[in-house]
Amino acid sequence: MTRIFIYSVLILLFFGGTFFGLGQEKYQITGIQYWSAPDHTRILLEVRGKASYKAFSLVNPNRFVVDFDNTTLAFPDRNITINDRIVNQIRFGNFGKNNLRVVFDVVQPVEPNIFFIENYPEKTQRLSINLFRPDLKNGAEKDRIAMLSEAKNKKVIVIDPGHGGEDPGAIGPGKTFEKDIVLNFARTLKKLFDEKTEYHALLTRSGDYFLPLKERTKIAEDCHSDLFISIHADSNHIKQNHGASVYCLSLKGASDEATRCLAEKENSSDLIVGVPFSENEDLNLTLLDLALTNNINSSLRYGVLILREIEKVHSVKFEKPKQAGFRVLKTAEMPSALIELGFISNPVEEKTLKQTDFQNRVGQAILAATDQFINLMAQKNTSPQNKELEAHVCASQP
């Protein structure tokens, strides 16, 4: 479970500046947050200024240490208990003159990934400390292999709750976080799929932590998934906007300007947490254009069916799927769709999105659409309904 520690920085008003001594710049750690993932703990330190640091590991007992030069705490010195499978607690201490030591008491030796998040607009910088336990990471991969063995002769459905961790997604007027809505819905949808003997469903994230977009897709590819469903909640400055919508990948541009903007917003998730975008990703996908095109056409058929079923239980914004360059949908190995459940920015729909009854009804609609899609694909495009869907697909393409 996510626990967030954000401390008031009244002490900054007392100091009234960032310099001390003989012109030497002083830095302060003004806040700390953390999130626990299955194989790592992510800690975010908010630092007033880009302080220099040195990081190293110690054993007997196991610790990971970050030493900051010319740095103090802007909140009371106290231990922070985490007690997940990677980090037991975080401790603070002074060493030398004007230096700060942050100690992470870890369960086992960890593999660290530590960096300042670039292009952060505020004066307060963010230092991302990611502590991985290799045995847990390898264990997760073994679990997926075991799952594939158990799921033999079943259709594997990977459900991706968007955002997570320090990326809350959209925030409703009632302070509801998109990341929480979509995780709860994804759990409901997984349960509905798993209740049917022909499906085995898997979540890309099972708790409140962030996954890079590429890693979400990779999980689906590693599991040889038959379908990839990314779950989101929409947002707009027009509070009256409402209804669900479905989006698919496009290699030729967006269906319209609004869809292009939405794709840019969803694609920016990685940048929020400091994950760089590689231009080679698009180059590699270009080499798979034929496979991608086939999957896009299948995805559009699936999207039409999803919208038809959702419309029976909830309003929809569009009758056909829209398309743009959604990075999380960029895979040549399976059909994929991004579903916006509704507008979290609409005060009425924000409340609806949290209701168990709504989540069950829309989940059942997606399940029904999936049943239809799997059956149609098995008929190899020979049925009248498939020809009707093909007409919708052609009409949907930008």
Image (cartoon, rainbow, N blue to C red):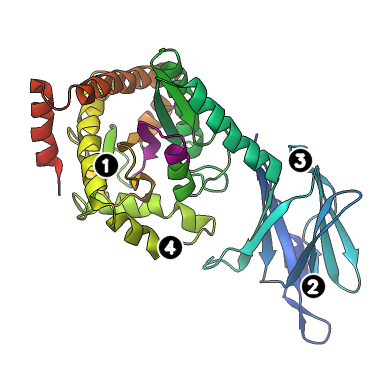
Residue type, label 1: Cys
The quarter of the rendered structure image containing the N terminus is top right
> Does the segment drawn in magenta span residue 126?
no
Number of other residues with Cα within 10 Å of mark 1, as a class: few under 14, some 14 to 19, many 20 or more? many
CA separation, marks 4 and 1? 21 Å
Going by the image, does 2 lie left or right of 107?
left
Are circles 4 and 1 on residues that touch, CB within 8 Å? no
CA separation, marks 3 and 2? 25 Å
Relative image position of residue 319 (x, y in whole percent): 17, 32
Q: Earlier in the sequence, mark 2 or mark 1?
A: 2
Q: Name the residue under label 4.
A: 278
Look at discs 2 and 1 and give the one toward the viewer.
1
Q: Give the range drawn in magenta.
A: 219-235
Look at discs 1 and 3 and give the one toward the viewer.
1
Q: Which of marks 4 and 2 is nearer the N terminus?
A: 2
Q: Say which element carries label 4.
A: loop
Look at discs 4 and 1 and give the one toward the viewer.
4
CA separation, marks 2 and 1? 48 Å
Q: Which mark is residue 69?
A: 2
Q: Say which element carries label 3.
A: loop
Q: Name the residue under label 1.
A: 248
